[in-house]
Amino acid sequence: MDLQQINKIEGIVGAEIKDLKIIVRTAPIYMGGVLLGSFRIELNPHTDSDEVDDKIAIYNEDTIVTFPKWVIADIENPPIGNGFHHPHIWNFGEQHHTCLGNIEDGVLFLLKEHEYVPLITILLEFLRNGYGWEGVEEGEFLSYWEKQIRC
């Protein structure tokens, strides 16, 4: 694998291999003119797990937005420090989930085929634009980043 090619992708500030994972760091990401933060993308092509979140994990390195009250209304004592890393990425306790929607199959195919440059390029586009989810188009969740509500 050629980390130099990954590092040449516009919007990438660094890539490395650590513990058999490919770790990619982004420059600050904006969605709809709103600063979300810089992200760490972890690709684990060697896992035996069938779970997407074990193969691809994306973390906001700067701003994790606290869950709005309507998200956690039915949960007693929700864990502190959890929330949205991105309108399509959240963590709650030990669970971390990236909702890739209609790009999931293609992204997993590229990971399986070790096509890392197109994979990272697609994930960057996903971070910048989502995949057409109404909440993002309407700015429903983006308003939380505008207010910089942090955990």
Image (cartoon, rainbow, N blue to C red):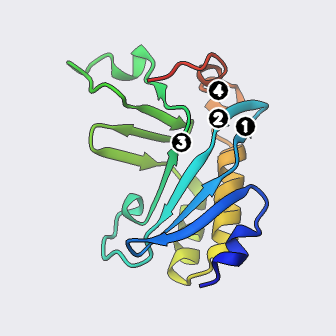
User: Gap in Å between the C-alphas at discs 3 and 2?
Assistant: 8 Å
> Is residue 97 at least partly visible in the picture?
yes
User: Gap in Å between the C-alphas at discs 3 and 4?
Assistant: 14 Å
Q: Which residue is mark 2?
A: 36
- Amino acid type, label 2: Leu
Quadrant housing the C terminus: top left
- The relative height of residue 98 versus residue 73 in the rendered view (above or below) is below
> Is residue 131 at least partly visible in the picture?
no
- Amino acid type, label 1: Met
Q: Which residue is mark 3?
A: 60
- Amino acid type, label 4: Leu
Q: Which residue is mark 1?
A: 31
Give the percent coordinates (x, y) of residue 18: 43, 70
Question: Mark 2, residues whose alpha carbon is within 10 Å: few (<14), some, or many (≥20)?
Answer: many
Among the two numbered marks 3 and 1 on one chain, the one whose residue lies closer to the N terminus: 1
Label for residue 142? 4
Horizontal side of 35 relative to 43 (left or right) equals right
The residue sitting at 54% across, 53% down in the picture is 40
Quadrant housing the N terminus: bottom right
User: Gap in Å between the C-alphas at discs 3 and 1?
Assistant: 13 Å
